[in-house]
Each structure stands twice: as structure tokens, then as C-alpha cells.
Amino acid sequence: MDRVEKLSQTRLKKQVATDTEETNISFQGSVAGINHIDYRQTRTVQLSKSWLRENRIICDYQQDSHLNAYKFLRTKVLRALNEHNWNTLGITSPGPEVGKTVTAINLAINIAMEISKTVLLVDADLRRPTVHRYLGLPAGAGLSECLSFGDPLSELLIHPDIGEVVVLPGGQPVLNSSEMLGSPQMANLVEELKNRYPSRLVLFDLPPVLVVDDVLAFAPCLDAVLMVAEAGKTKKDELMDACAMLEGATHVIGTVLNKTDPDVQSYPYY
């Protein structure tokens, strides 16, 4: 595993690229409402703690065998981001069904539990948005409607009443997700979020790298990416290929290994 760990943790040289090819997809020329966001007035939704526990979401400082794991992950991630003054992070995986969305949500919550830390969690898995389902939020408009129809961002944000976390749901599933994520509108949205709220960390739940080209299209907009793998499921070659595909587009700061043997290790490996 030495080669895998070296590949997944190597600081990669960032390359800024903009896709200017025309598509048949119609996007709004700008992101509506972004200049008028007041996070203190964001719509608040009370979540069911029993639902969160059922979906492996750690929502407070309750005794949980995985709490220390996510606190450890939080510390490692913040150290890597702070070292380079980065504030945008994508969470992805080589393949599907390895726990990347649960990891993204729990990481966002644990970072927001830090004093003076606020987090915006964006569901950018536009083909299969599931952040709202894990949180027990009703399906509704989100990022896809913001990009496609100009829905005001300020009307789409949700505060799930957990720490200083704000969620931008994915919205309705779309087939042209890579075009959306690679569009100038999405690039402008990310830059605006980075520049207007420099103290806020923006996390993006992304699709798997080896399944669709969405992450490749969006990676140049991100400061860094965290790769999620599953013990006994994700193959070494898949992990290496996923990290290699992002080389030159963004920085892969580490790998989280989910579902390790509890008798050997009771928390994800970073």
C-alpha cells in the first residue's frame, strides 16, 4: 500500500482550466441571489436525531464509536487546508457505494463544531443527489435549479440546525451534470463563495471519479479533494487510477478508508 498512500497524499500541482466548448445545454448567465446571502437568515429545518443515527450521521457530542474517527479526520483535513489557505474541498471516491456522502456530511458537521468554523456543504452529485435524504430533508430545488433556471441561491440554502452548517441540496437529478459542473456559471459560483466568505469552508459531495466525468470537469475549481475508499471493496488499482486522473487538476490531500474491521481499527483510516 506504500505506492497508494504516496499517490493519494502527494501534493499535486494545480492547473487552472476552463472548458469553453459550446454545449446544447442552456445555463443562466449568472448565479442569482449570491450577492444577497445572509446566512443568519437562512431557512432552518429541524432534523430527526433518530433518522440521523439510523443513517450513520453524527449530529452532536453523543457517545459514538465513530465520533473520534471524524474528529481525527477533521483535524487532519483542517491542517492540510490551513497550511495552504484553501477553503474548497471535494469529497469523492473511485467507485460508488463506499460511504463518501456519509463521510462528507459527518466531516462537515464535525468541522462546524469547531469554534469559529462555519461550513457550506454542497451536494454536487447532480446525477444522484442524496445529501438531503441522509439528513432527512424533503426533496426540492437545489444546485441544479440554480444553474439551469437561475433559482436564487439564497432561497435554496438550508440550515439543518446542527452547528454552523449550511446545506445546498443537489436538487432534481440531471443527466447533463458534467456540463453543469464544468460551466462558467459553476466556476463563478465557486469563486464567489471562496472570495465572499473566506473564513467559510465549502465542501462538495461529488460523484465517483471512475464512473462519470463530472469530477474531472469540476476539479480545476477546487483547492483540494479527499478520496474515500471502502475496505475489502475498493481495489488498489481503482484507487490509484482515481488519484492519477485528478493529477494536474487539483490536490488530493488524502484517503479515507471506510468500514475497517472494528476489531482491528474502530475508525476510518486517513
Image (spheres, grey):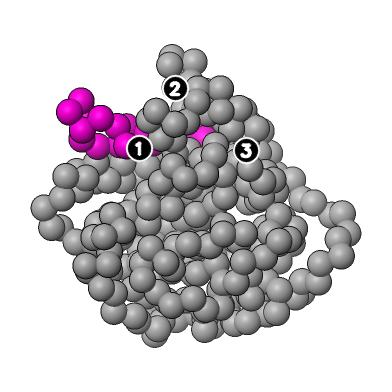
Question: Which residues lie in the magenta part?
Answer: 251-270
User: Looking at the image, is 133 positioned above or below residue 229?
Assistant: below
Q: Quadrant of the N terminus?
A: top left
Q: Is residue 145 above or below residue 50?
A: below
> Residue 265 colored magenta?
yes
Residue carrying label 2:
5
- Residue at point 36%, 67% (across, down): 135
Q: Residue furthest left?
A: 63
Q: Nearer the viewer, residue 238 or 190?
A: 238
Q: Residue 198's x, y, as percent?
A: 47, 60
Mark sitting on residue 210: 3
Q: Is residue 181 visible?
A: yes
What amino acid is labelled 1 in the image? Asn
Q: Residues at badges 2 and 1 in contact (C-beta under 8 Å)? A: no
Q: Which residue is mark 1?
A: 258
Left or right, 178 with reference to 118: right
Between the C-alphas of marks 1 and 3, the distance is 18 Å
Q: Residue furthest top?
A: 2
Spatial distance from mark 2 to mark 1, Cα to Cα?
Answer: 15 Å
Q: Of tags 2 and 1, which is closer to the observer?
A: 1
Amino acid of disc 2: Glu
Image position, residue 217 (x, y; %): 70, 48
Q: Earlier in the sequence, mark 2 or mark 1?
A: 2
Residue 221 position in % (x across, y down):
63, 51
Q: Give SS at disc 1.
A: strand
Question: Which residue is found at the position 51% from the left and 40% from the top?
Answer: 93
Mark 3 belongs to which amino acid?
Leu
Relative height, residue 61 to residue 71 (above, below): below
Q: Is residue 27 left or right of residue 156?
A: right
Residue at 29% across / 74% down in the picture? 47
Distance (Cα) linking label 2 and label 3: 19 Å
Question: How far from the left and from the top, in percent, is residue 53?
Answer: 23, 60
